[in-house]
Image (cartoon, rainbow, N blue to C red):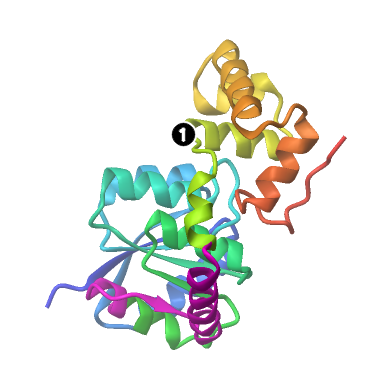
Amino acid sequence: MKPITVLLAEDHQIVREGLRALLKLEDDIEVIGEAENGRQAVELTQKLKPDVVVMDIAMPILNGMEATRQILQALPATRIIILSAHSDDAYVALVMAIGAAGYLIKQTASHVLPNAIRKIHAGKTCFSPTISKRLYHHEKKALASGELTAAKGAPKLTSREMEVLQLIAEGKANKETATELNISVKTVEKHRQSLMEKLNIHDTAGLTRHAIAAGIIESSVQVTIV
């Protein structure tokens, strides 16, 4: 029987090594690649075409949510499970909307991840028990109050705008952002202006606060707001 192929996307090497060692114990699961940032995760997924990607949210260059969105746009059959230290409702709701198949918090017992990989590979979804319970109650409340309908009015950002916004929030200057994304400084400036217009935010500090509030970067990431 062909094993389930897995790509690990996690910026901390010690965590990747632990995950790889854990999954190596499973006869039906094979780790075929590792990524230390979101952009590498997108590139390796397109190259290796794993069945499942285990994705952290807070990663440099490209966060896990935007990496997930880009992967699923290119390879919609890929199954992605988020593995994060944070279980904030905002993060969970965003990755669900993007199309992730599951969300586990890193405090989950070790045996849960292999089972979750098997479950989402079989076409199901999988969430940590505490998250599942909250999602159920939140959805009932949102449907009753009409919040789900109201949320549709949020401004739509392109994938490139999301990338630029993350790099701005990480403190990158226009030239650094241009180099990272392999685009011109002028193009970066156009994306920055578009972000400000769409979000009605007119300074870097405001864009950074929006990125944190929207889950584009985690609130625990150290950024300087001036």
Against 150, is 156 above or below?
above
Q: Residue at x 83, y 41 (%)?
A: 224
Rendered location of residue 73, percent (x, y): 31, 44
| Furthest-left residue in this view | 1
Query: Residue 130 appears in which quarter of the rendering?
Result: bottom right
Q: Main secondary structure of the magenta part?
A: helix
Rendered location of residue 34, percent (x, y): 43, 57
Residue to which mark 1 is pinned = 158
Q: Quadrant of the N terminus?
A: bottom left
Q: Residue at x 71, y 25 (%)?
A: 173
Highlighted range, magenta: 118-146
Q: Amino acid at mark 1?
A: Thr
Near-viewer residue (18 or 76): 76
| Furthest-top residue in this view | 186
Q: Is residue 2 magenta?
A: no
Q: Residue at x 26, y 82 (%)?
A: 27
Query: Residue 102 appears in which quarter of the rendering?
Result: bottom left
Q: Is residue 9 visible?
A: no
| Furthest-front residue in this view | 145
Rendered location of residue 2, percent (x, y): 14, 73
Residue 52 placement, left or right of 107: left
Q: Is residue 132 magenta?
A: yes
Q: Quadrant of the C terminus?
A: top right
